[in-house]
Image (cartoon, rainbow, N blue to C red):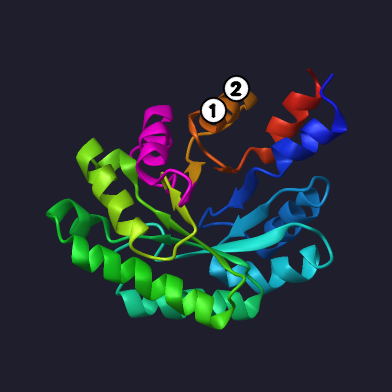
C-alpha cells in the first residue's frame, strides 16, 4: 500500500490536463471538482475556461495553468504574450507556451529566444509569481534541435522546459527528458507531457529528470498508486 504522503507526492508532480477542443463548461466543472480530491500541482486548461476553473479551485493548493500559442506555436510573439496576460488576469498562475517550432527547425535561434523572452517577461511583469513553461514539441525535432531549444530557453527567464503538446505526432520520451535535463542542469526544470497514462511511465520520466508531469490521466495514476 502506498502511504498517503507518497500519493500526495505523486499528485504534486502532476498537471492534471484537459485541453481537448470539444471540452464543455460542464466538463471543465466536473474536471476541476475531481481535481480537488488530490493536491495536484495544477489543472491545465484552455484560456477560455481559466476564470471558471479559478473560481472552483479557489482556496485549494492546486493552481490554474493555461496555454499560449497552443498547440502549434506559430502565433506572433505579441499575441502569445497578450493571451498569456489575459489568462493571468483571469486567474492563471502558470502559463505553458509553445515556441515557434518552424523557426527552431530553420535555425533562427535569435527569433526563438525573442519569442520565449517576450512571453516570459510579459507574464512576470503581470505577476512575478507566475510560473512559465516553454513547449518544444520534441517529436518534430532532432537531438541537436532539442539541444538548441534548451540553449534558447537558457537565455530567458522561463521556469520550465517541456517536451510536447500531446497534439502532434508523438509525446514525451524518456530519452528526450534525459537529454533536456542534461542540457539545462538545475537552472531550469523539465516537464514531461504527452502519452503519460500510468504510474510506471510517470516514474520513468521522474527518474530521467522531470519535475512535472502533464497528463489527462492524473486520477487514474493516483488510483493505480493507491492500489499498490
Query: What's drawn in magenta, residue-wise?
Result: 165-189
In the orientation shown, which residue stands out farthest toward the front? 186
Residue at figure coordinates x 29%, y 52% from the top left: 151
The residue wearing badge 1 is: 207
Could you classify mark 2 by the number of other residues whose Cα lies within 10 Å: few (under 14), some (14-19), or many (20 or more)? Answer: few
Residue at figure coordinates x 26%, y 63% from the top left: 112
- Image location (x, y in percent) of residue 217: 63, 38
Could you classify mark 1 by the number of other residues whose Cα lies within 10 Å: few (under 14), some (14-19), or many (20 or more)? Answer: few
- Image location (x, y in percent) of residue 189: 50, 48
The residue wearing badge 2 is: 200
- Image location (x, y in percent) of residue 72: 33, 58
Q: Would residue 25 appear left or right of 30 to someone viewing this image? A: left
Question: Quick check: is 10 in the magenta stretch?
Answer: no
Where is the N terminus found, in terms of image quarters? top right
Along the viewing direction, whichever of 181 and 62 lies nearer the viewer: 181
Mark nearer the N terminus (2 vs 1): 2
Q: Is residue 72 visible?
A: no
Q: Would residue 14 appear left or right of 6 to someone viewing this image? A: left
Amino acid at each position: 500500500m502506498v502511504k498517503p504522503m507518497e500519493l500526495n507526492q505523486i499528485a504534486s508532480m502532476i498537471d492534471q490536463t484537459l485541453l481537448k477542443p470539444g471540452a464543455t463548461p460542464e466538463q471543465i466543472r466536473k474536471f476541476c471538482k475531481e481535481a480537488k480530491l488530490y493536491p495536484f500541482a495544477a489543472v491545465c486548461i484552455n484560456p477560455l475556461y481559466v476564470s471558471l476553473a479559478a473560481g472552483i479551485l479557489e482556496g485549494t493548493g492546486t493552481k490554474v495553468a493555461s496555454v499560449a500559442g497552443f498547440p502549434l506555436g506559430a502565433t506572433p510573439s505579441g499575441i502569445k504574450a497578450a493571451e498569456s496576460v489575459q489568462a493571468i488576469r483571469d486567474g492563471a498562475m502558470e502559463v505553458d507556451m509553445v515556441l515557434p517550432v518552424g523557426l527552431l527547425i530553420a535555425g533562427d535561434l535569435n527569433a526563438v529566444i525573442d519569442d520565449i523572452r517576450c512571453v516570459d517577461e510579459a507574464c512576470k511583469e503581470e505577476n512575478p509569481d507566475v510560473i512559465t513553461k516553454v513547449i518544444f514539441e520534441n517529436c518534430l525535432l532532432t537531438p541537436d534541435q532539442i539541444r538548441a531549444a534548451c540553449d534558447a530557453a537558457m537565455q530567458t527567464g522561463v521556469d520550465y522546459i517541456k517536451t510536447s503538446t500531446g497534439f502532434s505526432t508523438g509525446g514525451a520520451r524518456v530519452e528526450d527528458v534525459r537529454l533536456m535535463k542534461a542540457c539545462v542542469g538545475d537552472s531550469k526544470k523539465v516537464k514531461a507531457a504527452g502519452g503519460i497514462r500510468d504510474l510506471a511511465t510517470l516514474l520513468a520520466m521522474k527518474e530521467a529528470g522531470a519535475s512535472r508531469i502533464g497528463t489527462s490521466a492524473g486520477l487514474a495514476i493516483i488510483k493505480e498508486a493507491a492500489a499498490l
